[in-house]
Image (tube, grey):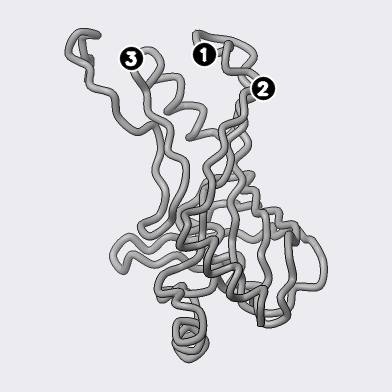
Amino acid sequence: PNVRSDEFLPCPAHRIDRNTSGLIIFGKSVEAMQELTEIFKTHSEIEKTYLALCVGDIKKDGTIDVPLYKDDDKGFVSVSFTNPKRKSALTEYKIVKNYGMLTLCDVKIITGRTHQIRVHMAHIGHPLAGDGKYGDYDTNHEIEKRYGIDEQFLHAKEIKFKITKGKLKYLNNIKLVAELSQKDKAILEKIEKE
């Protein structure tokens, strides 16, 4: 719908999963919101990096290029090579710190699918610590007892703009960074000490 500029209220240009912390970008005008919405939809002019605490001992950096299917009725996303409604999904991850039982990774999403990081990391056998939907119940229970992680450990850490045209081109090469919460920093310190 068309909205007059004087009626527009700033609102989020994208979303992050429930229980995920970090950056969310808001549009302050109709024009900015339209451009931001398209940029986040196509992922063509941004780089989004997340910090993810994954279960297991990840030995090397990698790329996951596996299509995903979202079942809207069940609210569940799964890997699918055959469903005609599947969508391509590409995720890159780099090890930040390996703790043995857990590995902290920087994760970049090249595409922006629902639950992409959570499903992709679970697919390679390294679900997010505390992820009740795509992780393992017993492992999550143990991690919660030991470290107090009671939801998926996923943080939208950084957004870098690569906008070369339009009203928002002044954002080109701007990088926004959100620090981890004190709670999450304390969890990582506790893991480090073990």
Q: Residue 6, located in which quarter of the rendered image?
A: top left
In terms of secondary structure, where does tag 3 sit? loop
The first of marks 3 and 2 along the sequence is 3
Front-lying residue, 103 or 30:
103
- Disc 1/disc 3 C-alpha distance (Å): 11 Å
Please name the amino acid that badge 2 sits on: Asn
Which residue position is annotated with label 3?
29
- Residue 4, horizontal then vertical, whole percent: 21, 9
Percent coordinates x, y for residue 21 in the rendering: 44, 52
| Contact? badges 1 and 3 (CB < 8 Å) | no
Question: Counting other residues with Cα less than 10 Å from the Cα at mark 3, is it few (<14), some (14-19), or many (20 or more)?
Answer: some
Query: In the rendering, which numbered label is found on residue 27?
Result: none
Front residue of 115 and 21 = 21
Label number found at residue 168: 1
**74 sits to left or right of 51:** left
* Secondary structure category for the residue under label 1: loop
| Secondary structure under the numbered disc 2 in the rendered image | loop
